[in-house]
Image (cartoon, rainbow, N blue to C red):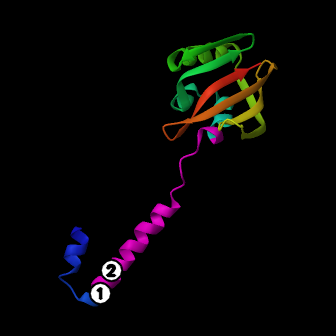
Amino acid sequence: MRIIHSLRMTNPGVSLIALCLFIFTETTLKAQIPPAASALERMPSLLKSADIKAMLPYFNTNLEIALQDREQTCTRSQAEVMLRNFFAKHPPKDFKLIHKGSSGQGGEYLMGTLTTTTGTTFRTSIVLFEKNGQDLVHQLRFE
């Protein structure tokens, strides 16, 4: 508002041009800022890097985790511990996205293959549902 107020004190024609340039610049800069990536877009790279800290904001308060033959519903903090232990035993080397899509129940999912540094391969799937306007991981499986 100070810019607009100070513009009133000068020549009205110049003020209008300055105001238009200011609005154009602000609009152009905002248009260049990319939108935040969704959980579905970020998960493949987060799995490949085993960046658990970056994954946590995308986890629902409670989620289902399946690690090989062990499956349980747990809290976000329990999921963090489980994934730290899993990735300590199986450090990721690569993650290849095979398929992603939408379920009939309104969720989204992705399926891929996690390859570890030891050569073990895990079929991986993630199911996300919207909660409070944000897509959150409700299920994470490494089989």
Residue named by callout 1? 14
Residue 71 occupies quadrant: top right
Q: Position of residue 59 (x, y in %)?
A: 55, 28
Q: Nearer the viewer, residue 56 or 128?
A: 128
Disc tally is: 2
Question: Is the magenta region chiefly helix, strand or loop?
Answer: helix
Q: Residue furthest top?
A: 70
Helix, strand or loop status at disc 1:
helix
- Residue type at mark 1: give it: Val
Residue 86 at x, y percent in the picture: 66, 15
CB under 8 Å between callouts 2 and 1?
yes
Let me know if residue 23 is in the magenta part.
yes
Q: Nearer the viewer, residue 72 or 46?
A: 72
Magenta segment: does it hold 63?
A: no
**Type of amino acid at the residue the image marks with label 2:** Ala
Q: CA distance from mark 2 to mark 1?
A: 6 Å
Residues drawn in magenta: 14-41
Residue drawn at 78 percent across, 38 percent down? 99
Q: Residue at x 60, y 38 (%)?
A: 39
Q: Position of residue 13 (x, y in %)?
A: 29, 90
In this picture, is 31 found above or below 141?
A: below
- Which residue position holds label 2? 18
Q: Residue furthest left?
A: 9
Q: Residue at x 53, y 47 (%)?
A: 36
Quadrant location of the C terminus? top right
- Name the side, left or right, on which 69 lies relative to 21: right
